[in-house]
Amino acid sequence: TTCGDGIKAGAEACDDGNTVAGDGCSATCTVQAGYTCAGSPSVCTPICGDGIKTGTEQCDDGNLANGDCCNSACQIEAGCEVEPNGTIATANNFATLSIAKKINGFVSPVGDLDDFLVTIPAGATGTITATTIDNFQGGLCSSSTIDSFITIFNAAGTSLGTNDDVGFPNYCSTLTLSGLAAGNYFVQVKASSFATVKTFAYTLQIDTTLFVCGDGTKSGSEGCDDGNTVNGDGCSSTCVVEAGYTCTGTTPSTCIHTCGNGVLNGTEACDDGNNTNGDGCSGVCAVEAGYTCAGAPSVCSAIVCGNGIVQTGEQCDDGNLVNGDGCTSACKLEAKPETEPNNSCPTANGPYALPAYVGGAVLVNGAANPGNDSDFFAFTTTAYTDLRFETADFAGPGTCGVDTELQVIGPDCVSPVSIVIDQGSIGNCSRVDSVNDPAFKHLPPGTYTARSFPYSTTGTYTYSMAVTILAYCGNGIKEGSEQCDGGATCAADCTLIPVCGDSIISGLETCDDGNTVSGDGCSSTCKVESVCGNSVINGAETCDDGNTVSGDGCSATCQIEVAPAEVEPNNNFAQADARALDAIPTLISGDALLAGAIGITGDKDVFKISVPTAGAVRFETFETAGFTCPTIATKLTLFNPGGLTIYTDTTDGISSCSVIVAYLKVGTYYIQVEKAAAGTIGRYFLQAKFLTSIGAEIEPNGTTATATPAAGGDFFIQGGALAADLDYYAITVAATQSVRAEVIEGTDGIICDSNRLTDSYLTLYNSVGTSLATDDDNGRGYCSLIDGTGATPVNAGAHNLAAGTYYLQVKSTATGGMPGYRLAVSIRNP
């Protein structure tokens, strides 16, 4: 026989007269999957309903039923998604669907993504609501039919929001985004990462509400709507209230010019109560040249160069009108030229003495030549100061046509004061200061070296750098980060001298309740008295877990409890289920301390977990009930209800013990303990701590002054960080306590160790803004972990702290920021 001659003979299952594969009869004359062949020469046709999409079939869902998006002829039915649509480039366009607002779709095969385009027209803003509906199964979405996950992206592919499910027992999803500008948006449907059913049919319903600027109705994100799109009448062409106006009413808005009423509003730089020009504040409420204005009603005064006060419009003012001393007779900075070689800290130009007054500055000029050139400049201060470092064009501060990067190094020429800063100033110039980075607050006297280098190594340019004093200890004026400046209770470094009973915790005080009476929790010497449940181990206490509840490892009288012991066999999930029903159950459904042993090489201890309320849980091993780990080495593994590994850890705990912090939804899970290497463990302790949710960050919280308060000893908080966003959280630490802080996943489907979408940088600061500990990727994947617990902690700066307020700063090191994260914190002894 000869395959391809059109004669079906011998062992041939078909012969269609060719040896081309893909037409039903293969190149070796066998029938291909999804086809049936008959005759000689063979005629091959697709088999509709076998679940294999072949030939002219548009779909094949494994049945011949109609009404499920794939009909009995294996063609896509009207109102259904059209595959492929797994990217925004191939998204189905809602405007062209046969049904205006609904579409039926399949998440199949496992991992399938379905994308749909929604457009908000030009001249409008709007709200998009996307909801999955279980129309195919005819009822509420259950864990066995649909478990969907919705994301809405902008045209650039950036996630604007997500929703996993409406809430138990409804596993459908709904997501509403408001205030959206005109443009294209993409709704994506996929299976939840927690789904037990990975493929399903669904109906997606999308509703849009449009708000049109100029229609005379103020709605959505519009600040006003006066019935037109004309600028200059108080309500702009984009329905934003213009500077100098107030707008009231909604159908339509009425706008009134307000400059001259003595009240600062809108973008007014001043308002002196009139509309007269020439008095420092112009008729349109702008500061006039040669003046500085402050207050409301604004008081304007002429700028006087040489009075020793740096006023608005002056770059410096050294109290004289002499040129050549760094500050000109016009109060402009005089630049010091660069001298090569200065490409290392030891060869830095300078050091240049910073002037001893607020606003005092030094300006240097430099050149990035060749393109990979690094220039170092040293600056010296003789007092505790708050500083600002800033690059600009060669002509000095005010403009920027270059693209720089900047880093500041401490007096030892090794330790960085800051990470590398790319931007922060005008354009692509760099700036770092005490306002945005606590590391530059209260810097002790010394020499600090700034390194400037190009963002790109492909070009050369000239530039300038200014270093300015924002607060100066010793001038008698409390400013910046200073706690005081002068007086009997103020130390030489502008920090308060401790006075017990003044309600200010300072120095070695661990508390200060405004009196010197003992017995009320704070002693007469301002030391915390033994109070069980305050998270501080004092007096006869052997533990203090922040509560007075027994059964969680630390009793109601703050004594270490005898932990319930494991009962063998508990080597797998089925055995763990059985042990959870024993007379002394080892089921973990809240805070717990369990004891166990690895009796033989290869032994694994599995414990069942029941999570009653979604939240963050910390699982941690110890060698002793006193929460230490001097010699043993463990491995922890967390499993989902289906037995799949969620996370594994060996040495993120104290010493060689293990810890896993994870956000868990309501349901059943399993935690497994084993020895990290071959051998046995005579005894270990497993602690489960259900962290308290304290909600979400409160924006703005980009400085220590606006930090979101975060109270408690074991808690987690939800946050989100755009590319340039800084999130600060204020925590309270008692004397001798240590801090463990970890960034974990905050958005379903976006994990720390995938695609760097959750990529954080974590810093711990003390109350005056000094950096104590930093971390980039010591946590899970690209997430951050600072750990000051244990006898030899990973981060000594977070260990055995003095009582007071501390700050945790979270920022993103990913280009597009982090869509969401959770910060999990434990403050404890040790």
Image (cartoon, rainbow, N blue to C red):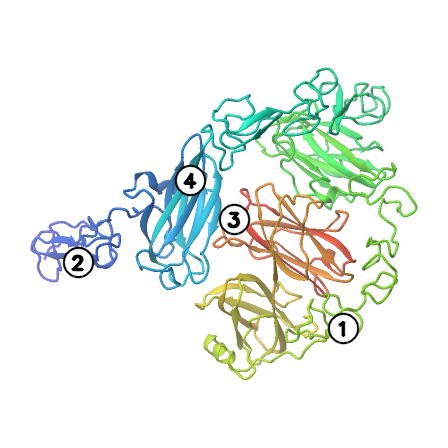
Of tags 2 and 3, the one toward the viewer is 3
* Residue 94: quarter of image: top left
| Furthest residue toward top | 278
Q: Which mark is residue 209?
A: 4
Identify the element where label 2 is drawn: loop
Which residue is under mark 2? 30
Q: Is residue 51 above or below residue 299?
A: below
Q: Earlier in the sequence, mark 4 or mark 3?
A: 4
Residue 786: x and y in percent read: 66, 56
Camera-side residue of 353 and 252? 252
Spatial distance from mark 4 to mark 3, Cα to Cα? 30 Å
Please name the residue that numbered disc 3 is placed on.
757
Q: Nearer the viewer, residue 620 or 21?
A: 620
Disc 3 to disc 1: CB gap under 8 Å: no
Work out how far the residue at label 2 is from the one at label 3, CA to CA, in angstroms: 47 Å
Q: Amino acid at mark 1?
A: Glu
Q: Secondary structure at mark 4?
A: strand
Above or below residue 514? Residue 326 is: above
Q: Amino acid at mark 4?
A: Thr
Q: Is residue 227 above or below residue 682?
A: above
Mark 1 burial class by Cα count in 10 Å: few <14, some 14-19, many 20+: some
**Residue annotated with mark 1:** 541
